[in-house]
């Protein structure tokens, strides 16, 4: 596996509480992504980053925000968690920092989030 | 935007039999195509990818796929499956462009290999 870690790996929280998931990479890749995986939907892109402090929305961004203050870390925040955000969240990376956008994405191990 | 259709949500197959997992895509621009595998409680691992060149792409674990532009398909095949191939398989597409290549995934096909 590429050097990608996600924390926490499992989290149970209550509706209305804020939650932050962290993705950390040691590969110096330029691009980072957050996906959610739900049965019957495959993986859907939430937000992505194309550099430090440069982010953009994906397909299912409502209710989520992200931040990237340094190359190696990409944070996903649920400002006020809802039960519909119960899911498995995957971080991915692509592209070397000095190159064009990478074609292949490498995935982290995932975070299982349950919102009660 | 791009989209992917995986028509078969579940595919059971006997051990040592061949298998084909179907993938069709839709896009108004040139694309890159990927197959990922996900074993239980794990992340996604790249099986193979088509970027350009030969339309027959060989990947890890004996899998191969063929890009068919006229039929907008990228079916995954293996001539003889093993028990260890039991997993979920995702087809994905991204636009052929520089910059962030956002992937669009199909809904997945669960392959079950029967002893």
Image (spheres, coloured by chain):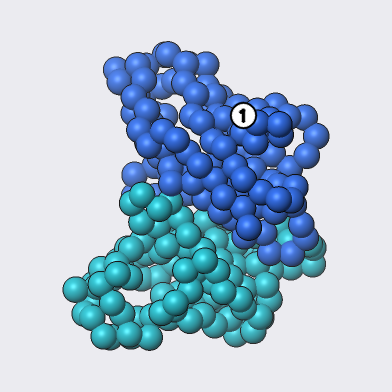
Which colour denotes chain A? cyan
Viewer-closest of B25 and B20:
B25
Q: Residue at x 58, y 70 (%)?
A: A48
Please identify the quadrant where the N terminus of chain B is shown: bottom right
Q: Residue at x 34, y 44 (%)?
A: B40
The chain identifier of the residue carrying mark 1 reads B
Q: Which residue is mark 1?
A: B65
Viewer-closest of B53 and A109:
B53
Residue B22 image offset from top left, x and y in percent: 51, 31
**Relative to A102, A15 lies left or right:** left
Element assignment for label 1: strand
- Residue B39 sits above or below residue B101 on the image: above
Viewer-closest of A35 and A8:
A35
> Residue B68 occupies which quadrant of the picture?
top right
- Residue B31 sits above or below residue A38 on the image: above
**Relative to B13, B63 lies left or right:** right
Which colour denotes chain B? blue
- Residue B21 sits above or below residue A29 on the image: above
Q: Residue at x 78, y 39 (%)?
A: B52
Count of labels shown?
1
**Counting other residues with Cα less than 10 Å from the Cα at mark 1, is it few (<14), some (14-19), or many (20 or more)?**
many
Residue B33 image offset from top left, x and y in percent: 64, 43
Please identify the quadrant where the C terminus of chain B is shown: top left
In the rendered image, is residue B24 in sight?
Answer: yes
In the rendered image, is residue A23 in sight?
Answer: no
> Residue B83 occupies which quadrant of the picture?
top left
Residue A113 image offset from top left, x and y in percent: 30, 68
């Amino acid at each position: 596996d590429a050097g990608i870690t996600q924390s926490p790996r499992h989290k149970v929280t209550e509706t209305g509480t804020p939650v932050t998931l962290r993705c950390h990479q040691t590969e110096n890749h330029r691009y980072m992504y957050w996906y959610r995986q739900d049965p019957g939907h495959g993986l859907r892109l939430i937000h992505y980053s194309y550099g430090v402090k440069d982010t953009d929305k994906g397909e299912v961004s409502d209710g989520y925000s992200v931040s990237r203050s340094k190359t190696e870390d990409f944070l996903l925040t649920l400002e006020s968690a809802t039960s519909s955000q119960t899911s498995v969240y995957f971080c991915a990376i692509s592209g070397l920092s000095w190159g064009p956008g990478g074609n292949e994405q490498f995935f982290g191990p995932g975070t299982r989030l349950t919102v009660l | 935007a791009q989209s992917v259709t995986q028509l078969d949500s579940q595919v059971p197959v006997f051990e040592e039999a061949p298998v084909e997992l179907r993938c069709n895509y839709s896009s108004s621009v040139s694309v890159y195509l990927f197959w990922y595998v996900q074993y239980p409680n794990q992340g996604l691992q790249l099986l193979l990818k088509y970027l350009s060149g030969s339309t027959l792409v060989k990947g890890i674990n004996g899998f191969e796929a063929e890009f068919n532009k006229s039929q907008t398909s990228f079916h995954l095949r293996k001539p003889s499956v093993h028990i260890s191939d039991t997993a979920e398989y995702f087809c994905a597409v991204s636009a052929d462009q520089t910059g962030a290549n956002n992937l669009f995934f199909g809904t997945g096909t669960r392959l079950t290999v029967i002893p």
